[in-house]
Amino acid sequence: MADAPDRYLSPNHGPRRNGLRPSLIVLHYTAMDSAEAACARLCDPAAEVSAHYLITGKGETVPLVPEDQRAWHAGAGGWQGRDDINSRSIGIELDNRGNHPFSEPQMATLETLLRGIMQRWSIPPEGVIGHSDMAPGRKIDPGPRFDWPRLARQNLAGKGSRYAENDPGSDPTPAAFIAAAHAAGYTATDDIDLLLHSTRLRYAPWRKGPLCAADMTLGHDL
């Protein structure tokens, strides 16, 4: 593959199943004390976890697993009615504990890396998702401090969808919101609380309280 690194560090990978190719990119944060600690874990056979890339807070890219191989980063969950996300995706770990902003060098490197991966595998912006998107209730990364609008403005992530089944002045029904979330890709659960938390984490992390009409936009106005 053109422009792909030729040296990888992690032994934790295998072939993609059923002939699948990457159609998604899943973003994570490491939630560890340092990039060095995260890299050590992602390369430890006993840990049985990995990703294709790690980006340090200084903006350095650490290639871990070849893109055509199945890394072990996504775990249980689903997206757009599909499971085995590991076989369908490329995983990127960002050195961040989850409670502070992502650095400018890190975001700039991520943008460059995303452009290359998306071009190599013909992945559309809507195929760039967070771990929390495909595993509602189980994962919250890359978390509320991650700048999704920045990626969306550059067509490096989807802008979401607007659903107008409800009167804009009224609160949506739970059934309408669940249907909208499923249509947007959030198919891993039917639990409205998990779906509400996951979609807000992605599109409106500041929003609190019960389901409201604004939740039906699912980020359309990013």
Image: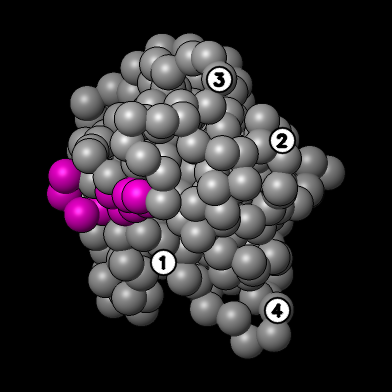
| Alpha-carbon span between mark 4 and mark 2 | 24 Å
Q: Is residue 104 left or right of residue 63?
A: left
| Alpha-carbon span between mark 3 and mark 4 | 40 Å
Mark 3 vs mark 4, foreground winner is 3
Is residue 56 within the magenta segment?
Answer: no
Q: Quadrant of the C terminus?
A: top left
Q: Secondary structure at mark 2?
A: loop
Residues at circles 1 and 3 in contact by the CB criterion of under 8 Å: no
The residue at 49%/71% (across/down) is 22
Residue 2 position, x and y percent, is 28, 76
**Residue type for callout 3:** Pro
**Residue type for callout 2:** Arg
Query: Which region of the structure is painted magenta?
Result: 153-164
Residue 161 position, x and y percent, is 34, 52
Q: Is residue 155 left or right of residue 200?
A: left
Q: Is residue 36 left or right of residue 40?
A: left
| Alpha-carbon span between mark 2 and mark 1 | 34 Å
| Residue pointed to by mark 3 | 210
The residue at 56%/39% (across/down) is 173
